[in-house]
Every structure is written in structure tokens, then in C-alpha cells.
């Protein structure tokens, strides 16, 4: 399985949601990072054939899915950012309904549904109406429907929103097992989710691709640029004006600021992380 995106743009009037975006990948997990409004969801909708690009092409195994969306739809699992459910159906009924929409039939469907419910820790609530579920449980139902057809390409838009730490780990383990068999694109603004699972990272800003590569290559953008410094609490506002702040740790009489930029008196170098690189690339 190979995905090639070539000069992709999505224009809304005079504004671009995505502009001249190009990217290639094969099997594995691509972490898609970017602030709100960066164009992540717009890009994923086009790859999922939900929305058509204004310009450019999307090739899957050299097939143009802009012109022939059916080529990928049977091989695709997609969880949009705002996933809707039927509140009066229980999880088993809903997943059976989604299987029918996807054209999945036969005796293996029931086994697949129960396998996913077990894997996503939903068996205890499987026969309760989805309307009674918490937000995190509904999100897990959404993840299950994306996996129903054993897809060769998986697209997840903010899949861990609403999940508690234990369920986030369960989700990461679940899709890690699939990464050797298919393309997985995981969009998130939670850098820690990407750090623990992604083979490569793509960072978006204002609809454009600003960086794409292995995590160590992305982190290399801020090599020698990450520092920590102890300053008085009342100096934070002034310090923020001249530096990209990564974190602030409050102590009794001072704060320890981690920032990306240039060295100042009293600062010590720190080992750079993906979060440092993400903030540097999206805020500068």
C-alpha cells in the first residue's frame, strides 16, 4: 500500500484550508500534528474521499482516488473528528448497521464485532443504548467502526479525545499491531500520543506542510535551541514576549521555564523533544 499526495489544495473562496500539500508514505503510522485551524481535518477528509480537492491529486497504489474514490473506500477505515452515533442503538446493533453500510456480511461479522468490543473494553456496555455512553465510550465505538472491515488504510482524526489515560494506551497498542499491514494516519494535537506510536511525523501550519520525517529528524530542527531557566514569577510575562515557551514549572519562590530560542544569561541547555520541535515549527 502506497499513498502519494501531490500539490493538494482545498480553497474556500479566497482562503485555503490546505495549500500545495505533497506527501508520500507506505505502511506504518504517520502522526499528523498541527494547531487548531492548521488544515488537518480538511486534509484527512480529502484522503478519505469525503471532500474533493480544488487542485492536486491523491494516489493510492498509483490509482487516482479523486477520480475513482471507490478504489479506496472498501479498503478504508475512517474516524472523523465529529463522529455521530444513533443513541437508541446499542453498540452491537450499531456496528452491525455500519457493517451493512460497508458491505460486510457473512458469519464472520459477529465474530469481528465481538473481537473489537473486547479489544476496546466495551463488552460490559455492548447491549446498552449508545446514548447512555460517556464521550470516551462513544469515541471507542467510533474506533471500532473504523476497524470493522480490516482496512488497508486507516485515518483517525483526534481519536483519543475523551479517552482516559488507560484507554489511550489500549488504543495505541491496538493500532500498533496493525501498522505492519496498512497505512495509518493519526491526527492529534496531543504530542504525547504521537511520540509513543508514530513512525514518522508530519507537522502542518496554516494549511501547509512544514516538516515531515522520522521523529529524530523532526527533533533535529531544535537541536541546540532548547533551554531551561529559573526566573522570578513576575518576570514570566516579559520573558514570553521574546521566547517560545514550552512549559512553566511553578515553584514556591520562582518558576522554571523551558523555552525554544537563544541562550540568555542563567539558561542551561536541555535535551530537545518532539514537543519542543512542534512548538518551534508552528509558532515561528
Image (cartoon, grey):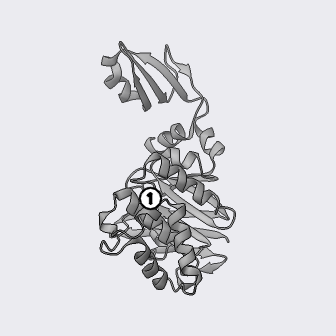
Q: Which residue is mark 1?
A: 207
Above-or-below relation of 100 to 20: below
Q: Is residue 269 left or right of residue 14?
A: right
Which one is in front, 61 or 79? 79
Quarter of the image with the C terminus in it? top left
Above-or-below relation of 151 to 68: above
Relative image position of residue 255 (x, y in whole percent) = 39, 19
Relative image position of residue 58 (x, y in whole percent) = 56, 74
Rendered residue at 36%/29% (across/down): 241
Tell me, yes or no, if residue 121 can be seen here. yes
Rendered residue at 45%/70% (across/down): 45
Which one is in front, 150 or 190? 150
Rendered residue at 35%/12% (across/down): 253
Res 133 → quadrant:
bottom left
Q: Is residue 238 left or right of residue 283?
A: left
Rendered residue at 37%/28% (across/down): 240
Q: Secondary structure at mark 1?
A: loop
Relative image position of residue 87 (x, y in whole percent) = 30, 71
Res 233 → quadrant:
top left
Amino acid at each position: 500500500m502506497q499513498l502519494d499526495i501531490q500539490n493538494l489544495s482545498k480553497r474556500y473562496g479566497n482562503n485555503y484550508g490546505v495549500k500545495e500539500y505533497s506527501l508520500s508514505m507506505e505502511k506504518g503510522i504517520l502522526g499528523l500534528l498541527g494547531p487548531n485551524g492548521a488544515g488537518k481535518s480538511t486534509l484527512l477528509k480529502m484522503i478519505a474521499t469525503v471532500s474533493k480537492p480544488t487542485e492536486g491529486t491523491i494516489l493510492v497504489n498509483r490509482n487516482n482516488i479523486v477520480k475513482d474514490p471507490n478504489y479506496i473506500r472498501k479498503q478504508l477505515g475512517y474516524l472523523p473528528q465529529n463522529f455521530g452515533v444513533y443513541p437508541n442503538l446499542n453498540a452491537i446493533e450499531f456496528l452491525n448497521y455500519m457493517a451493512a453500510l460497508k458491505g460486510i456480511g457473512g458469519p464472520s461479522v459477529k465474530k469481528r464485532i465481538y473481537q473489537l468490543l473486547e479489544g476496546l473494553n466495551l463488552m460490559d456496555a455492548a447491549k446498552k443504548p449508545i446514548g447512555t455512553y460517556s464521550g470516551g465510550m462513544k469515541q471507542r465505538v467510533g474506533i471500532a467502526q473504523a476497524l470493522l472491515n480490516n482496512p488497508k488504510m486507516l485515518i483517525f482524526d483526534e481519536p483519543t479525545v475523551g479517552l482516559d489515560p488507560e484507554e489511550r494506551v489500549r488504543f495505541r497498542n491496538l493500532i500498533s499491531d496493525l501498522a505492519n499491514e496498512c497505512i495509518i494516519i493519526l491526527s492529534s494535537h496531543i504530542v504525547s500520543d504521537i511520540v509513543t506510536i508514530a513512525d514518522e511525523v508530519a507537522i502542518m501550519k496554516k494549511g501547509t506542510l512544514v516538516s515531515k520525517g522520522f521523529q529524530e529528524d523532526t527533533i533535529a530542527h531544535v537541536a541546540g535551541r532548547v533551554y531551561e531557566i529559573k526566573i522570578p514569577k513576575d518576570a514570566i510575562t516579559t520573558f514570553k514576549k521574546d521566547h517560545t515557551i514550552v512549559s512553566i514549572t511553578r515553584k514556591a519562590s520562582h518558576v522554571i521555564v523551558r523555552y525554544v530560542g537563544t541562550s540568555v544569561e542563567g539558561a542551561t541547555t536541555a535535551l530537545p523533544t518532539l514537543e519542543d520541535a512542534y512548538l518551534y515549527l508552528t509558532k515561528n
